[in-house]
Each structure stands twice: as structure tokens, then as C-alpha cells.
Amino acid sequence: MEDKLLIKIAMEAREKSYSPYSNFKVGAAVYTKSGKVFTGCNIESASYTPTICAERVAISKCISEGYKDIEKIAVVGSNVKTSFPCGVCRQFMVEFGKDMKVICAKNIDSYEVYTLKELLPNSFGPEDLE
């Protein structure tokens, strides 16, 4: 799947965001190696701690449907800057592959692409528990 199409899907997911406290909408779209797409948006809570980011929603949906072969994820925020996954999301993503492609976007025409390994060097992952 083209990166721009995945960004567009993430932008559509962003519109479902429940973010009444920060007013910062985020959408994410996960693409698996088997060709499936899973989306997520950030969901806030008045007590803040149980708030969940779009990236973790999308990946959780992917995993709960039986897919663990994540190839890439697109992340789009609601400001004028390129959005990157937070530290918690980066650590969560490591569980499913340090070579995962992470598309950090402002919009369809303005984005940067990294591997998760580049965004979270020297991370702690499943291989550290062996």
C-alpha cells in the first residue's frame, strides 16, 4: 500500500477522535504484511491516565483480530507540525517489530518515514527476555 493512501486513512480515523480535553486529534492506520488495515484514534478520559493514543488503539485492534505481521503505521496529528508517536507508543510498537516503518505526517504531502529502530534506539523488547 502506498504511504500516501495509508496517511489518508489515518486522517479519516483522526476525525473519530474523542479529545475534548486537549482538542488534539490524532489518527493512526496500521498496515500488515498480509494486506490488512486497522485504524485508531486517540481517546481521552477526564482522569487523563486511562487516555489511549491512536497508535495503540490501531495496533490493539490489529492484534485482537489475530494479526501480528505489522509492516507500517501512519500517524497524523491535528496541528501544523509533523506528528510523531509518543514514547509510550514507541515502546508498545517495539513489541511487534523494530523494523516497522513509521510514517509521521502533517498531511498527505508532508511526511517523514523512519523505522521504529531509528525512533527508539536501544529499546527493550521481547528478545531481552530470552
Image: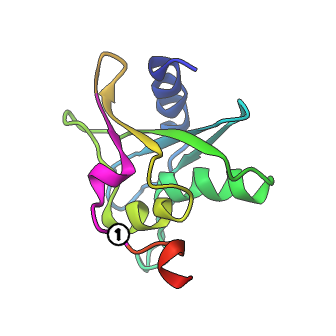
Q: Quadrant of the C terminus?
A: bottom right
- Quadrant assignment for the N terminus: top right
Q: Amino acid at mark 1?
A: Ser
Vertical comparison of 20 with 103: above or below: below
Location of residue 37 in the rendering, given as x and y in whole percent from the top left corner: 67, 35
Q: Residue drawn 47% across and 72% down?
A: 125
Q: Where does the image place residue 97, in percent across and percent down from the top left?
A: 52, 55
Residue at 55% in and 27% down: 9
| Image coloring type | rainbow
Residue 122 vs residue 7: left or right? left
Using the image, determine if residue 122 lies above or below residue 16: below
Residue ID at (50%, 33%): 10
Q: Nearer the viewer, residue 36 or 114?
A: 114
- Give the magenta range: 112-123
The answer to whether residue 96 is magenta is no
Q: Is residue 13 above or below residue 98?
A: above
Q: Locate residue 47: give its quadrant.
A: bottom left
The answer to whether residue 106 is left or right of residue 72 is left
Residue located at (32% from left, 65% from top): 87
Please name the residue that numbered disc 1 is placed on. Answer: 123
> Is residue 122 shown left or right of residue 43?
left
Task: Find the residue positioned furthest to the bottom.
Answer: 129
Q: How many numbered marks are there?
A: 1
**Residue 116 part of the magenta-drawn span:** yes
Taking the image as shown, residue 21 lies to the left or right of residue 64, namely left
